[in-house]
Image: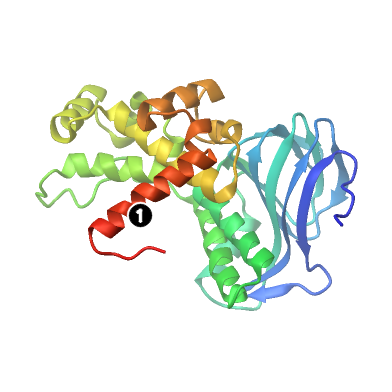
Amino acid sequence: MESPVKVGKTFEFEKIFSNDPIKYGNVYLHQMGEVCYEPGYVVEPHRQWCFEITYIVSGEGTHAINGQEFVVEAGDLFLTPRGSMHKVVASSKLRYLFIGFDIDETALGEDVTMLRCFYNNSPANILKGSSEIMTLFHKCLDEYYSSAACFQTMIESYLIQLLTLVYRAFTYTKNIRYLVDDKVNYVGLSLYSILLYIDGNAKDIKNIGELSKTLGYSSCYLSHVFKSRMGMTLQQYLCQKKIEESISLIETKKQTITSVSQLLGFSSPQSFSKAFKRVKGVCPQQYFSKEMIEKRYEEYRNEMIAIGVEVD
């Protein structure tokens, strides 16, 4: 029988090791989990006894540090310093992932130097995160939940990746042109640069104008090069990549269509559904129905059999 959920909480999954933190490499893990608060729910001010990283999955609310409020929404990455007074308020149904940790101050190594330098001199408390960070959060939780063979080894790997990506997110400045070595005359260099950037950043690209500015080219040039070489418009390719990412998020992490549309930068669930149908031929609800999943599996099975691969 499930334990009763506290009033104001839709769900709460949390692993706490505060009395005996688990050491992974040079990191002490105190807690990790995911919660969903109902609108108006308040986590009263409390002293933060370790560093905490929060990733907002969906909804809106505020995180306050020592009385300073920060508005948070889907896709935001938030840092709470050790020793600060922390408060959370849910404006709408607020769902977020969190991890509480410390570092081994006596250890040596690049990861310790990086973390010590960053968390002692944090340039900001909030910025837009990435779906990769959210995926690593969920992979850690999945390992705890399943306790499969070597799960502690997997957690250590995911945890170090997660902390490194958070560090990069707050401190790393991307190369504006996002090119491979432009001193070498590679065939299709400009096209490859465009593909490389879109494939790795589709979630965060709002429009073609923003993409052009980031890559350091004019919109006309990018659009012309892309259409002439790829046979589709730049907008079509960007939309296709966003939809591919949405499928992964919904199938592997049980995200809702509403939360995914927010994370991928669509103006509304309706606009996301229209874009999804243009790419896949059916709306999201149909695509993820039991019948469609079975149909896709049958198509895959037939393809494998046709090339001589046995499928159970």
- Relative to 92, residue 251 above or below: below
- Percent across and percent down for residue 229 are 14, 35
Q: Nearer the viewer, residue 151 or 197?
A: 151
> Is residue 249 at all visible to an observer of this figure?
yes
Say which element carries label 1.
helix
Q: Position of residue 204 (x, y in %)?
A: 45, 36
Answer left or right for 117 relative to 310. right
Please count the marks in the image.
1
Corner quadrant of residue 8: top right
Along the line of sight, the residue nearer the viewer: 272 or 295:
295
Does the rendering let one see residue 130? no
Q: Residue at x 27, y 42 (%)?
A: 195
Which residue is identified by label 1?
Answer: 301
Classify residue 171 as left or right of residue 70: left
Q: Is residue 299 left or right of residue 257?
A: left
* Residue 223 in which image quadrant: top left
Q: Quadrant of the N terminus?
A: bottom right
- Find residue 59 and report its horizontal and vertical position in percent: 68, 33
Q: Report the colour scheme.
A: rainbow
What's the amino acid at mark 1? Arg
Which residue: 71% across, 55% down?
52
Q: Kindly identify the residue that appears in the image at 49 percent across and 21 percent down.
A: 271
Image quadrant occupied by the C terminus? bottom left
Q: Is residue 243 left or right of residue 67?
A: left
Up/down of 98 relative to 233, above or below: below
Q: Residues within 10 Å of mark 1 (few under 14, many from 20)?
A: some
